[in-house]
Amino acid sequence: MIREQLTAPSPQDLAAFLNRHTRTRDCLIQVAGLAEVTYLGRAASTADLGAYLVLIKQDGSLQIHHPTGIKPMNWQPKTDRITAEVAEDVCMLLASRRSPEELVQVVFLEPQVALALELAQAGGFVLKGSEAQMQQALADHPELIEPGLRVLNRELMVESGGIDLYAQDAQGRYVVVELKRGRATQHAVSQLARYVRSVQQTLGNQATVRGILAGPSITAPARLELENRGLEFREISALPEQAASALPVTAQPSLFDP
Amino acid sequence: MIREQLTAPSPQDLAAFLNRHTRTRDCLIQVAGLAEVTYLGRAASTADLGAYLVLIKQDGSLQIHHPTGIKPMNWQPKTDRITAEVAEDVCMLLASRRSPEELVQVVFLEPQVALALELAQAGGFVLKGSEAQMQQALADHPELIEPGLRVLNRELMVESGGIDLYAQDAQGRYVVVELKRGRATQHAVSQLARYVRSVQQTLGNQATVRGILAGPSITAPARLELENRGLEFREISALPEQAASALPVTAQPSLFDP
DNA sequence: CCGTTTATCTCGTAG
DNA sequence: CTACGAGGTAAACGG
């Protein structure tokens, strides 16, 4: 599992270690210690000398963590080139990519640990309660939104943007449904209004087009704007009744299960 | 720097290790090995047996990385309780929080490495080229947007949302400026339109309110909608002339420097 | 490549 | 607590 480990390596050893493992790309590499970090690309940043943890995954993604916070201080989702070199008796890591052109530079002033881990096999990962799953469930059971609703289309592309669910109600009126897995904001209302406007323009003024925002909840200002625009809200939760008790999740049959 | 390291620990040793260091909260803890991960909260997820890397920082944030990708497979930005226990001869990590109520459970089937790192001192971090910096620069030099423009307010709070820059032009007309550090989208146009409408309502119909979207570029559909609504676009770049050459950044005086 | 949307978004900030 | 918007957002998906 541990492919290689160095403790307080010399600049030369660290550079060799980094180049060796970034070339083969079959390990998760990490280096912890005192370093300085610079970034230049879409923005620019500098981090003064401090204790950081650098992670390089097999796909060439790079992240530099500082002691707290869930997000890395600096990162690079993909890299075209990762190289380490020794200059002025310190090891320097350079990670760059094109499109957008950017560069992360780490100067290891005092590396403490370097680890190369075999982290090969990943297990299957399944996420439930995403908006995509919500969409599937409501497409299969549109009556959860409103009795008599028939879904005509999912992800219907209209000028600038896709309509989550395009449907027709019991009276034959066209209905645009915008789904939110979390609390709906004014942004969602703007989105829905834009889609309704597009559909209205396509169908002509004699047609009636309804807009429904469906989600677990809505903010007060969003509800106001929604009603001002003649749009509607339907309460629908992303997850079924939260087995908020304890794991392991007790199997409970629900529309959202499959 | 390495406070403690275990190799292929027993369930009991791993649980003791985790409880010891999560209690003191003065180390960055990591465990790598074969595990299963379950999450239940805002959504729900399961990860089958695979090789993962678990990081627990001093602030109680938790992230579980799979072998590729910049984002963790599972995470918890803050935790109210982190505990490890041994059940059925495996070590299980439970990390939970309230608000929102969620739980991450890691079952370590075959832990390979456990590390506690002292990662204390963080250096100062400075980011340049953020929207906040843009706002500062344009507040100081509004003529970059338009000659004769006078800035009245920054981050003026209007019903639901803050106006980046509120100003008056050479003719005395009020101007709402919305800044974008990246390419402006329809979302930005909606935002600007909402703010302009708010200001127009406040000032009354006899006043003329202009809306300006300022950024490095704008998408074609956004430009269309912008012009349809009688709003304007001004090209302004977030970073000064990108010293896109090589690091270290050559010092170049610019409005954006301070 | 552009353009849009989702995200267990995270994070800060203001009321 | 709620609500809103920024983010070097990242990542997916369609045209």
Image (spheres, coloured by chain):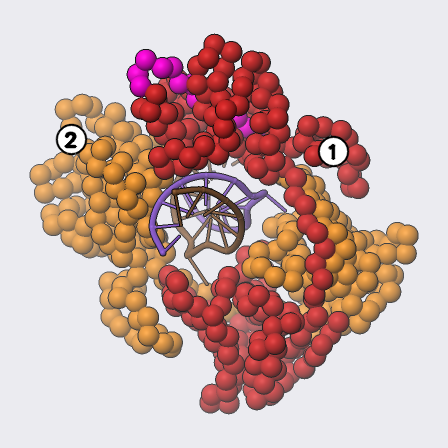
Chain colours: A red, B orange, C purple, D brown
Q: Please rate how many residues cluster around mark 1, counting C-alpha atoms within 10 Å: few if below 14, some from 14 to 19, many from 20.
A: some
Mark 2 residue element: loop
Amino acid type, label 2: Thr
Residue B227 image offset from top left, x and y in percent: 21, 37
Q: Is residue A244 above or below residue B114?
A: above
Residue A178 image offset from top left, x and y in percent: 48, 29
Q: Please rate how many residues cluster around mark 2, counting C-alpha atoms within 10 Å: few if below 14, some from 14 to 19, many from 20.
A: few
Mark 1 residue element: loop
User: Which residue is drawn at the image coordinates 58% and 69% (left, top)?
Assistant: A56
Disc 1 target residue: A243
From mark 1 to mark 2, how far is it between C-alphas? 55 Å
Residue A158 is inside the magenta segment? no
**Is residue B95 something one can see in this rendering?**
no
Taking the image as shown, residue A153 lies to the left or right of residue B11, namely left
Q: Nearer the viewer, residue B205 or A173?
A: A173
User: Which residue is drawn at the image coordinates 71% and 77% (left, top)?
Assistant: A3
Residue D14 image offset from top left, x and y in percent: 45, 42
Residue B200 image offset from top left, x and y in percent: 23, 28
Q: Nearer the viewer, residue D13 or A68?
A: D13
